[in-house]
Amino acid sequence: MSTNRPLFIPVILGTTRQGRASENVARFVFGELGRHSGVETELIDIRDIPLTTTDAGEAIKDAKFSAAVTRADGLVIVVPEYNHGYPGMLKHVLDTNLKEYVHKAVGLCGVSAGGFGGTRVIENLLPVMRELGLVTIFWDGNFSAARKLFDAEGKLLDQTYVNRIDKFLKELIWMSKVLRYGRENVELS
Amino acid sequence: MSTNRPLFIPVILGTTRQGRASENVARFVFGELGRHSGVETELIDIRDIPLTTTDAGEAIKDAKFSAAVTRADGLVIVVPEYNHGYPGMLKHVLDTNLKEYVHKAVGLCGVSAGGFGGTRVIENLLPVMRELGLVTIFWDGNFSAARKLFDAEGKLLDQTYVNRIDKFLKELIWMSKVLRYGRENVELS
Amino acid sequence: MSTNRPLFIPVILGTTRQGRASENVARFVFGELGRHSGVETELIDIRDIPLTTTDAGEAIKDAKFSAAVTRADGLVIVVPEYNHGYPGMLKHVLDTNLKEYVHKAVGLCGVSAGGFGGTRVIENLLPVMRELGLVTIFWDGNFSAARKLFDAEGKLLDQTYVNRIDKFLKELIWMSKVLRYGRENVELS
Amino acid sequence: MSTNRPLFIPVILGTTRQGRASENVARFVFGELGRHSGVETELIDIRDIPLTTTDAGEAIKDAKFSAAVTRADGLVIVVPEYNHGYPGMLKHVLDTNLKEYVHKAVGLCGVSAGGFGGTRVIENLLPVMRELGLVTIFWDGNFSAARKLFDAEGKLLDQTYVNRIDKFLKELIWMSKVLRYGRENVELS
């Protein structure tokens, strides 16, 4: 690569719901991502982003979140499936930025109470990711029966997820690197 | 039909955004729906539904909104397209109810600043509507270039929309009637 | 109901692929549906519908398939997931009719080699079903790891599917009845 | 870039329908793409790809089409909207390859008889493109009322499309270059 500067890939915990199972998932993915050399990460809990609800869009941008997205080379979004769609508060947050996302990579981790690994919320997010200018990688994290996957201390109980998330993260790192090369070196011609 | 009780079909204005073009659309559709005999309607502005943002789902149900959905035979949802998806605050509201929606009809009015009539947000909402138990009719309202469609007083400038929305409303009324018949007369066997 | 005429609900086997796992699924659902009194069914294998591939749409309609859809009150579509979408040949068949589908019910059975029960192809079909005028019920059949679900004679190995498909079929029968009532008794007003 | 070898970006005409309006669109985009230096292109008409319809998937691969995709750095897919979904025969063709598509760019041109520029078929294709490993760029070609856009000789009548398709092609070329750099120089780590 052109530089040795580490990639910055924050993990977004995409729900404010009380008792959210996604928090354990986000902490797990955040921990795994942190093991990769050449990657800096940060856990962004959308609960901590102060946003008005009496308006929407770029007008209500939070400076700190925008700075994180601006700095990011890629994102992980951990997203529970609510009625086959995405949580409203996650979309409310995502819609506050636009050009900050362009030509960056995103990997999606779907979380569901049932057995289908959040596949439906992932499909539902694809057009939104694309319109924001993000490239959604073609590996996903799929966390089924998420409440049973972790113990009371938030420790992962099923180690097969470690290998699966590793493949997901390698692809995300690859795409983040490649798109950073593009942003820095290739002009629209 | 089994009864002569009027249908109740509220119109939901699905964004809290300042300067929202969807407000004129919602008022227009609300007015047209009100002309139909045998239909009662009501304009529900999601701005007026008090919801916490530190939780999500049925736990934060607003009693008045739930009562309206419970009473409803059908819904119109007026929904602007934000990054090819639905407004977060609309989803946050919709997710607070579940069984209240089951076996009822919904018609979607997409609103966009550009030329494609909110077609993409309509596609994006389909799986959510279905999971809520709502039947999305196969006519849509499509409001393109919504800022130019109304004058400063909110009066519609393009009268071709009157006829189009009339077809949409007739289909919605049909489906609302039919599903009410089903809810009241047909048992799961 | 207004008549005692049985409902007609054919099961469409939606792939021509050699070695298709969906055939066992279709035969199973067909068998279960046949147990319901007041329902006639038929297994329609899209392999048996002679269609040119040098044209598309209503121009190439097969008379027998059109007659079946015309007579139908509801449909089951058994559909494997190919690259998160629907099989091309199924869509080629579906596109040959239009008004024949209007105001009828459909239930979708997703079939996948992996663990997610064809959830993604079901999401992918929703906008198509709607545009055809079909009402997709909000229960699905989800057949994961479909090759291991049946023995060499095509006998179902996991009996938990019997109960699940029963709920799905009851909902489909309900919606088929209700919409038939609507088609026969309720006018667009 | 690492090499001066031209990019190869074929244009796929994605329907076999008689009287297809998409043919004019494909020829127009093919012509515009050919003006870009450093790009080689080719018009691939899916009518010319001999495929059996009694099977599906990689088993029925056409050697010539596979070779073109293997050589490609990016693709344009010109796709009419049939019942809000993609043409069956296009999907039948696309499903015959897999690894040939991985980490390559694709730009989608939606074609519709009506006014919404094929937006719905584009949304419907997104999950399929992703699963094939293709990166769908966030500019689209949207061809509304496609029959009136061209004269009897297939000449474009509305010159505003030239500028719009130019932006689309520049983005596609950018993404094709960037992903080629990635395929050739960046390892999964």
Image (cartoon, coloured by chain):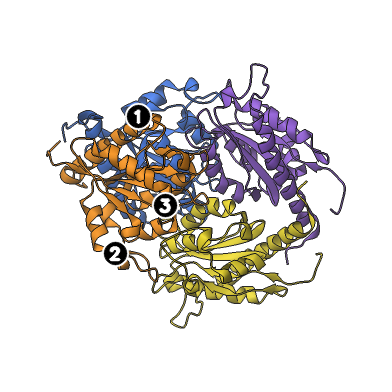
Chain colours: A purple, B blue, C orange, D yellow
Is D89 located above or below residue D27 in the figure? above
Q: Amino acid at mark 3?
A: Asn
Q: Residues within 10 Å of mark 2 (few under 14, many from 20)?
A: some
Residue type marked 1: Asn
The label on residue C61 is 2
Residue B188 position within the rendered picture, expressed as x and y whole percent measured from the top left: 26, 30
Q: Nearer the viewer, residue B115 or A181?
A: A181
Q: Chain of mark 1?
A: C
Pointer 1 local density, CA inside 10 Å: few below 14, some 14–19, many at least 20: few
Labels 1 and 2 in the same subunit: yes
Mark 1 or mark 2, earlier in chain: 2
The percent position of residue C49, horizontal first and vertical second, equals 31, 60
Name the residue that disc number 3 marks. B142
* SS for dot 3: strand
Name the side, left or right, on which D103 lies relative to C146.
right
Tags 3 and 2 in contact by the CB under 8 Å rule? no
Residue located at (69% from left, 29% from top): A28
Res C163 label: 1
